[in-house]
Image (cartoon, coloured by chain):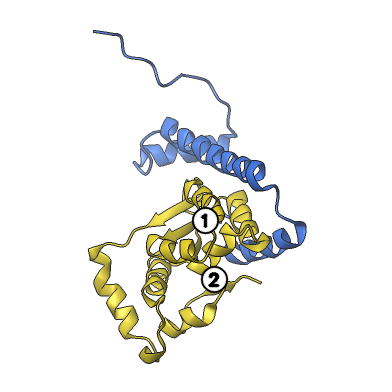
Chain colours: A yellow, B blue
Amino acid sequence: MSQAFGGWVLDHHALAAWARVEPYAQSLVWSAMEVGMAVAVPVATLPLAYAATRESAHDVLRALLDLPVTLHDPFTEADAPELGRILAGAADPAALTSDALALACVVHSAHRRGWPVLTGSAAALRALDPDLETDELP
Amino acid sequence: MAPRERTTKKITITLPIDDAEAVERLAESGQVESVSRYVTEAVAFRRAREDGLAVLERRFGKPPEHALEWARNLVARRIGPQGPGA
């Protein structure tokens, strides 16, 4: 499906919310699809999303990945230098948590696509980029 | 050698003059491969959207109205008053 109309990058909090069939995460994907917008999933966020949800929710997560509206942003060697820059640019590197690499991938996807991030926790993303556009799930 | 199976079908469609001429201009300028290609992609795009919504509705049901209203406001803020084509 086209990404011409833009969309959202989903972080692991948003993915986990989707997997738990929480109404706001479901609604954002539904509404994006209604108008031909897309959602991008940085694949580096998927292990955290799987880890944060029960086994029974994993099929729900896979359903999102299979939707025509979903774009997969890979994590390759070519992305490493930019991810390194994002991590090194953190305002307080000592405060980075174990999900820092996944969050850096989310920030990288958002920069590359020029899209906002749908998240359940904007503060952690802002630690990597204070100017990042985010929409926070209620 | 077995005959090659047809994967396309020629049909006649009617478009508003403005739309038809706009697509022809895109094809003539090389911005799209052909008028047929443009229409094919437009149909595929709509089908993907409708199929995706059908999958969501079948699997999870339509989200509750209060959550949809929140999401549609976000979408409207992102695409502006002119809609996604703007």
For label 1, the crowd category at 10 Å Cα-Cα, with few meaning under 14, some 14 to 19 and many 20 or more, is few
For label 2, the crowd category at 10 Å Cα-Cα, with few meaning under 14, some 14 to 19 and many 20 or more, is many
Picture coordinates of residue A59 (x, y %)?
A: 53, 49
Is A94 left or right of A116, judged from the image as shown?
Answer: left
Q: Which residue is mark 1?
A: A55
Q: Which mark is residue A119?
A: 2
Against B5, residue B39 (above or below) is below
Against A105, residue A70 (above or below) is above
Q: Residue at x 44, y 85 (%)?
A: A127
Q: Amino acid at mark 1?
A: Glu
Q: Amino acid at mark 2?
A: Thr
Against A65, residue A107 (above or below) is below
Q: Is residue A37 in view?
A: no
Picture coordinates of residue A76 (x, y %)?
A: 27, 62
Q: Residue at x 50, y 59 (%)?
A: A6
Q: Which image quadrant is residue A95 in?
A: bottom left
Q: Chain of mark 1?
A: A
Q: Which image quadrant is residue A136 in?
A: bottom right
Query: Do tag 2 and tag 1 residues touch (Cβ < 8 Å)?
Result: no
